[in-house]
Amino acid sequence: MSRLTVFPGHPLSGEVSLPGDKSISHRAALLAAMAEGESRVTHFLDSGVTRALLNALQQLGVDWQLDGETLTVRGQAWRSPDQSLNCGNSATTLRLLAGALAARNTAAVLDGSDGLRRRPMGRILQPLRAMGVAIESPDGEHAPLTISQRAAGQQLRALTHPLTLASAQVKSCVLLAGLAAEGPVTVIEPHRSRDHSERLLSALGVKIESQPVADGWAVTIHPHPTDLPAFDLTIPGDTSAAAFWVVAASITPGSRITLAGVGLNPGRTGLLTALQEMGGRIEIIPRGEQGGEAVGDVIVSSADLRGIEIHGERVTAMIDEFPVFAVAAAFATGVTHVREAGELRHKESDRIRALCRLLNALGAKVEEHPDGFTIDGQAGLRGGAVVSAEGDHRIAMAAAIAGLAADQPVTVQGAEMMAESYPKFAETLLRLGGRIRMEEENSG
Ligand code: S3P
């Protein structure tokens, strides 16, 4: 275990070079593995969760090479692995792979860490089974999931699948399986989630339609019986990694930072909008498109924030940002209220509980609700505590950001979790002018 201590009182300045987007890195690696020929992905995120996917692809017989941030993948026929595919802590790996394995009719067992085994999987089992995929779970809801091979010539069925909760992972899983269906497959979400899969699939020649419908937003994929073509792609900066620095600069007095090349997919920009509404000094300079995604530079200066209310589709557009958003809310004046966000209980940790525990330990006035939380901002946090990362990379990084502006330092125990999505987090904090101390602890 490692401990990261962040000391307050040091303004942040300079330019951040962001890691490649986690969601797009997953999709790029997976689609390259399903393509025919050699694909090259630049600015790929090399981190715990993307390594889980790459290792799984290797077990499926896919050749890849990662040279710094450049990933080269030689797509080929997949072979059934001898051992289960270890998806580590990555639900994106597991859920997207399930759809891809179904499309490629490749038998495999999908498994992962104890944390991943607690994440809900009924949401992919049900639509995949409705399409005719033979997929089993020991209790009908959790990993390990066993996918069996279908008889030769047995195609997957067309499907229209309404989701009660918007989820890009579930949508992507079903769309990927739809590549090999005998007719169109439609996913209807109550509102739009991030559409990275749709953008990439459509750039590769797959017919995809996306439109508003009476009960939300529908995405339809048409079967694509041939292999995808190989591609070259440059991945934008990770919007969710940028979110930590947006909050960091906003709450740390005297700060001004520039985030270059941030992905601005509308399904991801909820935190930027929320902080702007809270009075954040955030300038967004559009820089066109990269890899089929909007990108831009974001300049953030410290500001006095006000509390706000978040619910409904705004929750989806910032689904990964609530730990650090809660830190911003603790530094705002007035009340921040988040509701209709019960899905946060099913992330890498129960994030409603974990962020309430974190903020409580740091001296905030916070109240937990079944589907959200309320923070009575007192324009500050006491700090001076050792807090647990709760086995969750984003709780760990949010706690570190809190330390920048608290009255006393904050120590995060289990800081190694940050490397799941952002291995250079501490290094970046240091480079921006933050004062930190890193300690390794013997677990014995
Ligand atoms: C992701 C979608 C989100 C998000 C996760 C990555 C993706 O999950 O929380 O970190 O890459 O599709 P849900 O779609 O299940 O909300």
Image (cartoon, rainbow, N blue to C red):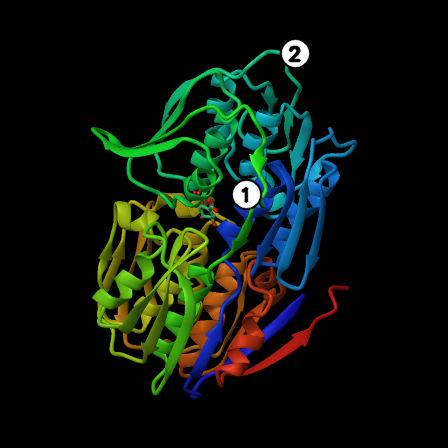
Label 2, residues with CA under 10 Å away: few <14, some 14-19, many ≥20? few
Q: Are marks 1 and 2 in contact (CB under 8 Å)?
A: no
Disc 2 Cβ-to-ligand 1 distance below 8 Å = no
Decide which of tag 1 and tag 2 comes sooner along the chain.
1
Q: Is residue 129 above or below residue 100?
A: above
SS of the residue under disc 2: loop
Q: Residue at x 43, y 34 (%)?
A: 171
Disc 1 Cβ-to-ligand 1 distance below 8 Å = yes
Q: Quadrant of the C terminus?
A: bottom right
Label 1, residues with CA under 10 Å away: few <14, some 14-19, many ≥20? many
Q: Residue at x 65, y 11 (%)?
A: 151
Query: What number of labels is visible?
Result: 2
Pick the front one: 360 or 404? 404
Q: Is residue 334 above or below residue 256?
A: above
Specify whether 34 is left or right of 331.
right
Task: Please state which amino acid type lies under the numbered disc 1.
Answer: Ala
- How far from the left and from the top, in percent, is residue 293? 40, 53
Q: Residue at x 34, y 49 (%)?
A: 267
The residue pinned by badge 2 equals: 151
Task: Please state which amino acid type lies under the numbered disc 2.
Answer: Ala
Residue 91: which numbered mark, if any? 1
Q: Quadrant of the N terminus?
A: bottom right
- Where residue 312 sits, quadrant-wise, is top left
SS of the residue under disc 1: helix
Note whether residue 142 is visible.
no
Q: Residue at x 48, y 47 (%)?
A: 347
Pick the front one: 31 or 53? 31
Specify whether 139 is left or right of 409.
right
